[in-house]
Image: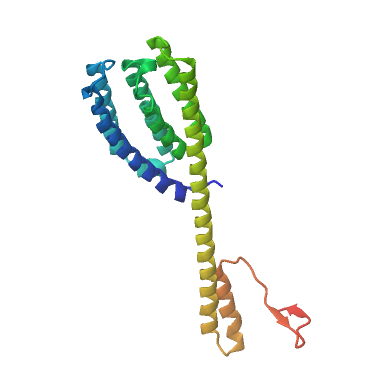
């Protein structure tokens, strides 16, 4: 079930907000490793330059008029660009912190969860392939210092994480759609009952006014046409009045 824009836009807006919060927390966490023992693979200047770029990117993302962008139908494109930029920054950070020996590979998990929860399946597949391509490129440039087993585990773990997140996201969307449909049906029935109750309260004793009141009620219910029928005394037959 594919939810409509009334559900997706608020969902995407909340996704952007939580994405910014996670970005901030990740940046705070990534400031600490160079000051811990055993960080010999870190090149301090390029590493902090990446963090500054990520922080500036987060500020730019926060400043965008997301509600207007989604209303215009282009907000998702900006989200794709945001995800791709984050993947590139993570890839560069991995490259300058040891390549295949880098401890930053789990950062790909953050972007994978984000696009798995936010985008259509085709977009998820494209970004997952983009992540694989970036990581393999980094490994090639940095000397491919990783075993086949480690590479297999890294790539399959991302694929499984993307699949799991996508499944949970689809289930959530299905529940949201079902809830919206149930609410719409309830509002429709409430409107019908209200129209019937109003017609019953205003029904006159004058038989010539009965048709007018009934037609007003039919219009309020949203019907395009109706027929007035007269049932015979026995209730077995009727004729169109």
Q: Is residue 109 left or right of residue 186?
A: left
Q: Give the camera-side residue of 7 and 116.
A: 116
Instruction: Tell me the residue at 53%/33% (across/down).
Output: 122
Left or right of 29 in this view: 157: right
From what the image shows, is residue 232 above or below residue 49? below
Q: Quadrant of the C terminus?
A: bottom right
Q: Please tell me which residue lies in front, 241 or 237.
A: 237
Measuring from the top left, give residue 96's x and y in whole percent. 31, 16
- Among the 4 quarters of the image, the one containing residue 139: top left
Residue sitting farthest toward the bottom? 205
Residue 64, visible in the rendered structure:
no
* Residue lying at 54% horizontally and 46% vertically, measured from the top left: 2
Q: x, y percentage for residue 68?
A: 36, 43
Q: Position of residue 51 (x, y in %)?
A: 26, 26
Asked if residue 214 can be seen in this view, the reply is yes
Q: Is residue 188 left or right of residue 58?
A: right
Farthest top residue in view: 143
Q: Is residue 12 above or below residue 143?
A: below
Picture layout, residue 59 above or below residue 144: below
Q: Nearer the viewer, residue 212 or 119?
A: 119
Residue in front for this viewpoint, 100 or 121: 100
- Residue drawn at 29 percent across, 15 percent down: 41
Q: Position of residue 86 (x, y in %)?
A: 36, 28
Up the image or down, 4 lies above or below 38; here it is: below
Residue at the location (38% across, 11% down)?
142
């Amino acid at each position: 079930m594919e939810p409509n824009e009334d559900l997706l836009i608020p969902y995407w807006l909340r996704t952007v907000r939580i994405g910014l919060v996670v970005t901030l927390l990740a940046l705070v966490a990534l400031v600490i490793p160079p000051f811990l023992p055993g960080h010999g693979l870190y090149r301090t200047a390029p590493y902090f330059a990446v963090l500054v770029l990520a922080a500036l990117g987060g500020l730019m993302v926060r400043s965008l008029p997301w509600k207007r962008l989604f209303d215009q139908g282009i907000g998702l494109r900006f989200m794709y660009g945001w995800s791709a930029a984050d993947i590139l920054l993570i890839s560069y950070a991995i490259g300058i912190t040891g390549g295949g020996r880098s401890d930053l590979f789990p950062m790909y998990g953050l972007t994978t969860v984000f696009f798995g929860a936010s985008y259509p399946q085709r977009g998820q597949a494209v970004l997952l392939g983009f992540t694989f391509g970036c990581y393999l490129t980094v490994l090639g440039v940095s000397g491919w210092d990783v075993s086949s087993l480690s590479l297999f585990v890294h790539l399959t773990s991302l694929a499984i994480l993307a699949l799991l997140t996508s499944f949970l996201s689809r289930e959530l969307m299905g529940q949201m759609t079902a809830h919206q449909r149930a609410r719409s049906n309830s509002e429709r029935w409430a409107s019908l009952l209200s129209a019937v109750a109003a017609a019953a309260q205003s029904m006159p004793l004058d038989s010539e006014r009965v048709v007018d009141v009934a037609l007003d009620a039919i219009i309020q219910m949203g019907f395009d046409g109706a027929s007035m029928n007269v049932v015979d005394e026995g209730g077995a037959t009727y004729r169109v009045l």
